[in-house]
Image (cartoon, grey):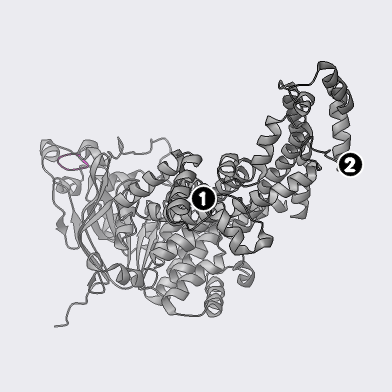
Amino acid sequence: MAGYIIRRLFSLIPVLAVVAIVVFLIIHITPGDPAAMILGEGASPEQIEELRHEMGLDQPIVTQFFLWLTNVFKGDFGDSYFLGKSVLQAFWENLGPTVSLAILAQIIGVTLALVFGIIAARYRGTRLDELVMGGSLFGISVPSFLLGSILILLFSVQLKIFPVSGYQPLSEGLGEHLKYLILPGITLGIMQAALITRMTRSSLLDVLSENFIKTAKAKGLKEKSILLGHALRVAFLPILTVIGESFGGLVTGAAVTEALFNIPGLGQLIISGISRRDYPLLQGSILLITVVYVLINLIVDLLYAVIDPRVRNSYRS
Amino acid sequence: MEKEKQPLLKINNLKTTFSTYKGELSAVDGVSLELNEGEILGIVGESGCGKSVTAESILQLLDENTTTYDGEIIFNGKNLLKSSNRELEEIRGNEISMIFQDPMSSLNPVITIGKQIAESVRIHQKLSKKESMKKAVELLRLTGIPSPEQRVKEYPHEISGGMRQRVMIAMALSCQPKLLIADEPTTALDVTIQEQILKLMLQFQKELNMGIVLITHDFGVVANYCTKVAVMYLGQVIEETDVKSLFSRPLHPYTVGLINSVPQLDGDRSKELATIKGVVPSLTQIPKGCRFAPRCPLATEKCLEEMPNLESAKENHQVRCWHYEKVLEGELQYVN
């Protein structure tokens, strides 16, 4: 198993290399000049040229790339042009809120999805099934800003249960932390649930037509034990894949929801970086997000082995 | 006069229907069978003739959303088709057990075989986890699996097909059932293993005085192991008798055809192997008269129009054919 993890970590290297090159190129090819951004509209071309020289932006792009890459290997991702701190620090500060939100949203999403997915599979073809499937279609289709706005209107403005927006770190206490995260968590959770519910239902239906389910029934097992004890364990593999993928998506791309609820997360960080052409910040955070994404995938793959003994065997060899 | 003994299993006019998008399909149409304690009833026929559906109907294992059962299945004096879910759960795996055709896919791939056996013991005998696991080891030992203490910790993909079928047998016999339904238990196995598995079943059958419903398409198995036979075609029983009568004088042209098509070791090699022409029609195209008529060498106008009933041709020998007398008179060649 340890050998497998090490091999997987090594396979990270080419992925990161490709991401580094592509991100670097796209950022530098995109029109827009950080020097001009820093100096503002009144700057003369000479001033801009001078700052470009200071920042090293007048050097050939290959030179710039290798300079950046060497520093990255040393663990130095550079400093943000605008934030007044290192890229690593900014990334680290914004990772916390995003991960908190992602975990909460995923807990809400998976719980809803398993409950409704199992119900839909158990009562397949009935009105209940149609209702759940219709609901999940709604969840997939509704845009997050709309769902979020409705929740704000209902729970913050009308009922005044939760704050409209903002964020409190965990150090302020779990209650305070969750109070701010619950509405964005529900917004993202419902959207996650919609997708995972469909996967749960179809995966369960596949498994329920397998022969070993008949064996379980012929043994005299109750329907509940067949569904939860026998079918769900086997059906969980593809569900886990979707959970992993969507969790990766949450960590990296909940920008709209973060903006709506004004949560200082990675989405916000990157969007502000793009609009201000903050090259080091963008390059660094995208590379780091890639690492996070790949690590999440690795964890999912390792969880397969926990669930399925056949996968366990293949990792050993 | 001694009161007649009640049969262990009595199926009366069983009809199993599937509702599909093509309409109502009648997979089993009026099957009646009887089995006493200690008897082995063979059900034979081609693929798609309703053998497995009959077997699974006994325990009502088919998809409940699309299947309707009609008729009576009386086990130990109790009509299973009228029993509640809870009553059925108590009978399944306890008084009636089942072994399936494909041991590869009939065991849960993510649960150890020990747990899978222990589970049936636990639910029916209210044993603790530890006790039921001990019982699982014992059961595996009885089925002849070496070092069962190790094996119980293994997963189905780690053991061979023959071994898996032994696990299925251990599971099925864990509560010493009165009736065992074996749906082609050896079809997916090597010939050498087939014999071992059947012998194992027979050994337990004698010890427990079980009744067995053995579904097969292998006449060799029927001849060697069964007490009586029912031949099925397209959802109906077309001939039913004891094994000796069947092989000495089959009466239905279909049965004759089936037995003739079994290759003989000492047969005439220059002669072509007998076959039954055509294929079993699908359930959406059931013939109007005798269901076998379109493929039958003896079919007449009457056969195509009117369905014959299953009637007694001789003592203990039922046949569903308008022309069985012609078969008796030797109009069809029977090579056995």
Q: Quick check: can you spot residue B335?
A: no
Q: Is residue A190 left or right of residue B306?
A: right
Any magenta on residue B165? no
Q: Tell me if residue B206 comes above or below residue B109 in the rendering.
A: below
Span highlighted in magenta in the image: B287-292
Tag 2: residue type?
Answer: Lys
Quarter holding the N terminus of chain A? bottom right
Marks 2 and 1 belong to one chain = yes
Query: Dot 2, crowdedness within 10 Å: few (<14), some or many (≥20)?
Result: few
Q: Residue B39: which numbered mark, if any?
A: none
| Residue type highlighted by circle 1 | Gly
Image side of residue B254 versus residue B306, left or right? right
Indicate the position of residue A60 as horizontal and vertical percent values: 86, 20
- Mark 1, Cα crowd under 10 Å, few <14 / some 14-19 / many 20+, is many
> Tag 1, which secondary structure?
helix
Q: Chain of mark 2?
A: A
Outermost residue on the top side: it is A45
Q: Which residue is mark 1?
A: A189
Residue A256, image x, y percentages: 57, 39
Which residue is painted at 22% across and 75% down in the image? Answer: B6
Query: How far apart in space, not on screen, are marks 2 and 1 (Cα)?
Result: 38 Å
Residue A166: image x %, image y %?
Answer: 60, 50
Q: Nearer the viewer, residue B222 or A279?
A: A279
Mark 2 highlights which residue?
A74
Depth check, front residue: A219 or B240: A219
Name the chain letter of the residue that bears numbered label 1: A
Residue furthest front as drawn: A42
Provide the secondary structure element on which disc 2 rests: loop
